[in-house]
Amino acid sequence: MARIYKNISTQDTHDLIVKKENVSGDISKITIANHDDTDTNVVQLHLFDGASTTYVIAEASIPPRATLVLDDNLSYDGGKYSLRLTTSSTADTTVIIK
């Protein structure tokens, strides 16, 4: 069962897992799907310390009707960092974190 499902349709930075919540940073898979028929979505997955430091985990251009699957080296310290996603377009995007 997935821990987090999030639908996104705005060009912005989105908190997926906020630091110090009761959700650990033990992640086995992240799926990011672009459901749009025409727009590509450039996404950047990163860790944010809440102040000024950002560590980019992945950055990819997801074409229309395509899915990015990340399944290697995803765990992090959820007490120190928030997991965030920045999107470049308003393409309908779904993020599933397991």
Image: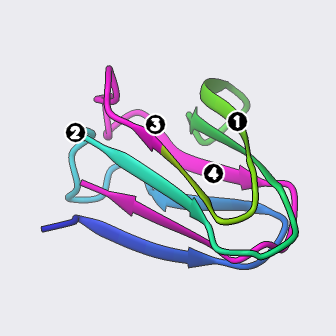
Residue at x 75%, y 62% (from the top left corner): 64
Query: Mark 4 or mark 2, which has the lower sequence index?
Result: 2
Q: Amino acid type of disc 3?
A: Tyr
Query: Mark 1 or mark 3, which has the lower sequence index?
Result: 1
74 with respect to 47 (left or right): left
Q: Secondary structure at mark 4?
A: strand
| Residue closer to the observer: 91 or 81 | 91
Q: Secondary structure at mark 1?
A: strand
Where is mark 1, residue-wise? Answer: 60
Tag shown at residue 28: 2
> What percent of the width, then of the height, locates residue 24?
21, 45
**Within the magenta stretch, is there residue 68?**
no
Callout 4–callout 2 Cβ contact below 8 Å: no
Q: Amino acid type of disc 4?
A: Leu
62 above or below 48? below
Q: Residues within 10 Å of mark 3 (few under 14, many from 20)?
A: many
CA–CA distance between discs 2 and 1? 19 Å
Q: Nearer the viewer, mark 4 or mark 1?
A: 1
Q: Nearer the viewer, mark 4 or mark 3?
A: 4
Tag shown at residue 85: 4
Quadrant where the image shows the N terminus: bottom left
Q: Residues within 10 Å of mark 4 (few under 14, many from 20)?
A: many
86 with respect to 11 (left or right): left
Where is mark 3, residue-wise? Answer: 81
Query: Mark 3 or mark 2, which has the lower sequence index?
Result: 2
Q: Secondary structure at mark 2?
A: loop
Q: Amino acid type of disc 2?
A: Ser
Q: Residues within 10 Å of mark 2 (few under 14, many from 20)?
A: few
> What percent of the width, then of the height, locates residue 40?
83, 57
